[in-house]
Amino acid sequence: MSENGNRNTLASNVPDFRPELAFPQLTEEMVERLRPYAREETLPENLQLFTPGERQVDMYVVLDGEITISLPVAGGETKIIAHHRRFDFSGELNLLNSQGSLVGAQTVTESRILRIPRSQLPRLMRAEGDIANLITQATIWRRIGLLGEAAGGIVLMGHAGDAEMTQLQRFLIRNSYPHRIVEVPAEEVALLDDGLLDHEPSLPAVVLSDGRTLNRPTIAELADELGITELPDPEMIYDVVVVGAGPAGLAAAVYAASEGLCTLVIEGIAPGGQAGTSSKIENYLGFPTGISGQRLASRAQLQALKFGVRFAISREVITAEQIDGIHKLTLAGGISVCTRSVVVASGAQYRKLSVENYTQFENHGIYYAATAMESVLCRDNEVIVVGGGNSAGQAAVFLSGIAKHVHHIVRGKALASTMSQYLISRIESSSRITLYTDSEIVKLEGASSLEGVAWINRRSGDLTAKPIGSVFVMIGAEPNTGWLFGTVKLDKKGFILTGGEDGFDMTPYATSVPGMYAVGDVRSNSVKRVASAVGEGSVVISDVHRYLADHRHNFAVEPHSALAALRSASAATPLQPAEP
Ligand SMILES: Cc1cc2nc3c(=O)[nH]c(=O)nc-3n(C[C@H](O)[C@H](O)[C@H](O)COP(=O)(O)OP(=O)(O)OC[C@H]3O[C@@H](n4cnc5c(N)ncnc54)[C@H](O)[C@@H]3O)c2cc1C
């Protein structure tokens, strides 16, 4: 086995640690303003304040004395990573969410502290803007520091090429959760599993900070164990539940919570959505040198947490129904959530090719958009466009003005049935575009990025292989609306119809179900871009406010009686049957 510090995975993607931002000191005046949220206590020396893995830990401000912060490291040891003295405060990202603490804290000497209970933190964060910003900034930089600690975090053991291992690792990276990789070569995995006879294979495994091992956990199990998922409160009726934490959902959550709505976000995988898979977004306003989708998403999530948004991560919504004005969303695993309004921001997935190594080259040679940004990457090189629709045709024509040559691959016999005639004419008349009908890509090759592609003519069996580094896959996107089927009105492709179609609520984002709105890529005819998704997510909240105000008489029921009604109602009762 060999240990790969997490520098190889997470730390290489995070900025250099800045201790002055991670450990700012409160001023005396700030400490005085914290007193109404806190109680002063005198604690004996060597008292454990919280341990790694503990959830909902309080925040401590040192008045006199000293607290040390320690991180569990390999071999059951701990490493002291911070000393908090006068006017320093404890806590990292787990102050804002329900994740178990990654570190432990202990008094060194007898210490006088202000203890701010978790129940008081949201009030403090809302009311004391400057202190809230200081805490938020410190929590980000402390997490960055922990991500850079090669010896800390949980341990993920397994074989590097294994699909389950990759999935777990991707999940941890996308949720900025510190971890180390212990690589077990494929032969050792086989040996270990042979010894198990009729048992299930044991790897990949996750060793938690308390020493327990989870063998082959599912993403949901791991998320629950680490506290990445915050299970929704079944007794609560939220003002708004946002489904999906891509750019549109995160924007909706920030605006909803900052305007005082009790907000829950439910996300099936990890915050960021499609944008979270983009290595650099260069056309989002305000980031002249671009920003990775992952970083944009974690900043937005933090902003949402600061305003008190709750996140249920790695929990997919599987059904929706509405009874007496209250929406009930059921999550995978059977938990249900009640809410007065819903913002659907479940996005879409670009269709992908079924070729080996495909995901390895996404963003490293495989692209889903042909804009000026991507075109820079293929200037004077040969490129491939895949797809027979108008978007593929436009891409081929556009790229033919930049690339050395465009190889346009379609599975159909001809373009006529799927593409506008003007595009077909341009493709046919261009000496820089070669059309390959009845064809499909069969091989992708390269080390860190795409270097070679082979495709086959399915009729003749002719194989063509070329050293090409850019493939534009434009075979359409599928909306994530399966969970809404039979409830809201969808267009022919399954995207959600909004905005007064067929006489339903005239606001641009209203769906055919009262109190349910759709924003971003999941919405029919939306512009499929990060900025438009963020814009729609931001402005839809004014519609939600209006809806809640207009329907407050419907909600003037005791929450518990509404819940009882929902629970006794048949789970199969659909919202409003609609034609798909
Ligand atoms: C590789 C790539 C690169 C891109 N680059 C750019 C770029 O540079 N610039 C640009 O402007 N645009 C870019 N785009 C497009 C852009 O990312 C999307 O337009 C944008 O992410 C749409 O945001 P959204 O929030 O509407 O949906 P999405 O980003 O699709 O997010 C939807 C979220 O909902 C979740 N979800 C789905 N169903 C459920 C369910 N039932 N329950 C709970 N959660 C659910 C998903 O897991 C996902 O996280 C790129 C897209 C890709 C794929």
Image: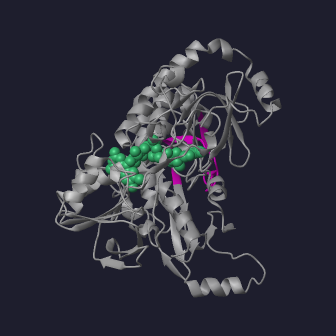
* Left or right of 523, for residue 473: left
Quadrant in the picture for the C terminus: top right
Quick check: 197 left or right of 176? right
Please give the name of the residue rendered at 51% of the width and 37% of the height, measured from the top-left corner: 491
Residue at x-position 19% and y-position 58%: 429
Q: Which residues are magenta?
A: 40-68
Residue 217 in view (yes/no) = yes
Q: Is residue 63 magenta?
A: yes
| Residue 93 image point, x, y percent | 50, 47
Q: Nearer the viewer, residue 17 or 45?
A: 17
Can you give x and y, in whole percent of width and height, for residue 394 in the image?
28, 50
Q: Which residue is painted at 57% across and 84% down in the image?
A: 186
Q: Nearer the viewer, residue 381 or 262?
A: 381
Q: Residue at x 51, y 76 (%)?
A: 161
User: In the image, residue 531 lies at what x, y percent?
Assistant: 35, 39
> In this view, which residue lies farthest toward the right?
568
